[in-house]
Amino acid sequence: MNNLKNIINFSFQLSLVDIFNSFRRSYIGIFWISLTALAYIFCIGFMFPYFFSGNLVESIFHVSYGIIFWFFFSITLRESCDAFPLNQGLIFSQNISYMVYILQIFFKNTIVFLVNLTFLLIFILIFNININLLYFGLSIIIFFLITFSLAIIFSIVSTRYKDFSSMIGLMLQLGFILSPIIWNEKILGDNAWILKYNFFYHIISLVKFSFFQINYYIILMNIIYLIFFMLLSFWLYKFKSNRVPFWI
């Protein structure tokens, strides 16, 4: 138990150091990332109603929600693919649990996500948008656990198979385009059933239903993903992570 606590504590400290080093000599630091997200949100959010004859407030809320959660999900997975190669020196010189390097990435992006999330919460308060707090909290926990499980899987597999990280990058780009992140699923009309076969739609839409009627199909799919990815990540880390030094 103490060992796990030390791993988490050390990983969190490394993530803070990573953030500090990334924004050294910057006046606003981590908020540059939030400004980037806000630029996307307002540019796309204000354009969306004109293209699709939608409501401005609904459009900005939809885009802000999608981008904030997608940024966290996609950046965490992209960076996890390089978790071990980028720490090659430490892996060979220090006897540290490999989980530290994955948690470092996860904690760093979680901090950024929480900063960005404050803007979404402010928007919710300003426009008095209803929210199911219990479902919101539970769905974020499931969302985090799925993302973390995938980060473990991707970090190990991409170390073994060098083309895997490029494939993930391509899949995330396609996922961003084909999922209703900057566009609304309403425009699909009768063809909205296609989204049932979109993995990224299931993940990103999970928390969104905190603000609307709960979608039990989305919940079920994410619970299935969570169980599968957690079991797979546990198996890979337990039986394959010891091969990481030979794959780097």
Image (tube, rainbow, N blue to C red):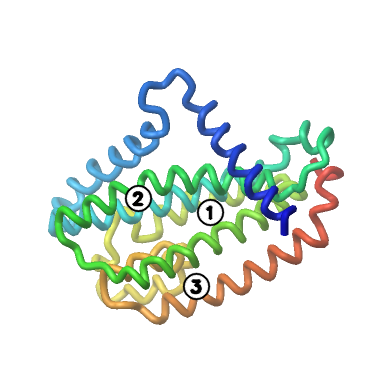
Q: x, y (%) of residue 247?
A: 82, 45
Say which residue label 1 marks: 171
Residue at point 39% right, 73% down? 194
Q: Nearer the viewer, residue 169 or 103?
A: 103
Q: Residue furthest top?
A: 25
Q: Can residue 165 be seen?
A: no
Say which residue label 2 marks: 117
SS at badge 2: helix
Q: x, y (%) of residue 167?
A: 61, 50
User: Is there a contact, CB below 8 Å, between mark 1 and mark 2?
Assistant: no
Q: Nearer the viewer, residue 242 or 14?
A: 14
Q: Is 190 located above or below residue 17 in the figure?
A: below
User: Is there a contact, CB below 8 Å, between mark 1 and mark 3?
Assistant: no
Q: Can residue 131 be seen?
A: yes
Q: Earlier in the sequence, mark 1 or mark 3?
A: 1
Gap in angstroms between the C-alphas marked 2 and 3:
21 Å
Q: Is residue 58 left or right of residue 13?
A: left
Say which residue label 3 marks: 222
Q: Is 169 located above or below residue 200 in the figure?
A: above
- The amino acid sitting under disc 3 is Asn
- Mark 3 crowd level (few <14, some 14–19, many ≥20, 10 Å Cα): many
- The amino acid sitting under disc 2 is Leu
Gap in angstroms between the C-alphas marked 1 and 3:
19 Å
- The amino acid sitting under disc 1 is Met
